[in-house]
Amino acid sequence: MPELPPRSAPVITIDGPTASGKGSVADGVAAALGFHVLDSGALYRLTALDAERLGIDLDDEAELAACALALEPTFTSSRIFMDDRDVTDEIRAERIGNLASAIAPFPALRAALLDRQRAFRRPPGLVADGRDMGTVVFPRAELKVFLVADVEARAGRRHRQLIERGATADLDMLKTALHERDARDANREVAPLVAAPDAITIDSSHLGLDEVIAAVLELARAKGVAGGAR
Ligand code: DC
């Protein structure tokens, strides 16, 4: 499906590496503007979770694509359900994130998720976060942000998140895993993690969440992207 941009539904894309804070920034920007949110990583994670549950061979591109097409998740404002099962926390596990990253290079799988992602574009607007939101999924987005942060800052954030959730976490192992995931996401042939030529890069290493949200909202205003709320 081509990207059909109803002017009534502007899109702000926020791409970047894992643990750069994309999700929290996307949520904050969307709340301030009254926009919808697409957490595209959740779709890759849901596919990974379901593929694992079904025992699908992680090299079987066609089966993985079929699995992605068949997903019937329900997104509420804060939870994600699959067949009435709350999988919000399960898909956030590092294991599922790594599995998602491992299957994400398959073109057929990415194609299977394309229309599903574009369907999130509805009035009054959308904030979409991921790796290829500005390059592939919404190439004509009104505002494209590429959010980066150094590995120290990202590993520290991920470590705090895991501890808050009651999980155990080793900072050095997290750093190594982040490096590996970055390399895999950035070096794949299809839709690699790369800033769109017209994206504006924000380095959040030394910024608080509110400061990053404010910076994105300022850029949105400058681009004439107006929200309905607050
Ligand atoms: O953003 P995340 O950590 O939830 O994403 C998990 C994995 O899914 C990520 O390592 C690569 C893949 N992904 C992708 O390939 N394209 C996207 N737009 C979003 C995620």
Image (spheres, grey):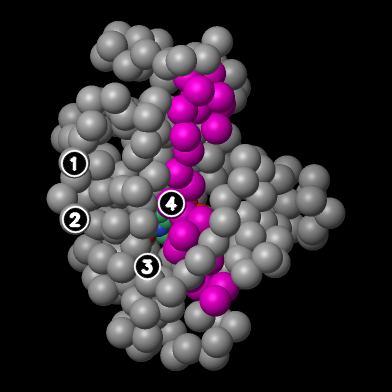
Residue under the point 50% across and 23% down: 34
Sequence order check: which comes first, mark 3 or mark 4? 4
Q: Amino acid at mark 4?
A: Ser
- Give the mark nearer the N terminus: 2 vs 3: 2
Disc 1 + disc 3, Cβ < 8 Å: no
Image quadrant assignment for residue 96: bottom right
Placement of 38 over or under 95, stated as above or below? above
Give me the C-alpha separation between circle 2 and circle 4: 17 Å
* Callout 4: CB less than 8 Å from ligand 1: yes
Crowding at mark 3 (Cα within 10 Å: few <14, some 14-19, many 20+): many
Please tell me whether mark 3 or mark 4 is closer to you in this view. 4
Asked whether disc 1 touches disc 2, contact meaning CB atoms under 8 Å apart, the reply is yes
Q: Which mark is residue 1?
A: 2
Q: Amino acid at mark 1?
A: Leu
Does the residue at mark 3 contact the one at mark 4 (Cβ under 8 Å)? no
Q: Counting residues from the N terminus, which is met first, the one under dot 2 or under dot 4?
A: 2
Out of 111 and 178, give the one closest to the viewer. Answer: 111
Mark 4 closeness class: few <14, some 14–19, many ≥20 residues within 10 Å: many
What residue do we see at 59% from left, 19% from top?
210
Residue under the image location 26 percent in, 74 percent down: 108
Q: How many marks?
A: 4
| Residue 38 is one of the magenta-drawn residues | yes
> Is residue 180 in view from this perspective?
no
Secondary structure at badge 3 equals loop
User: CA separation, marks 1 and 3?
Assistant: 24 Å
Provide the residue span drawn in magenta. Answer: 27-50
Q: In which quadrant is the N terminus drawn?
A: bottom left
Identify the mark nearer the N-term, 1 or 3.
Answer: 1
Question: How far across and down, in percent of the image, does residue 181 sit?
Answer: 45, 61
Q: Which residue is mark 3?
A: 104
Looking at the image, residue 153 lies above or below residue 215: below
For residue 225, the mark is none
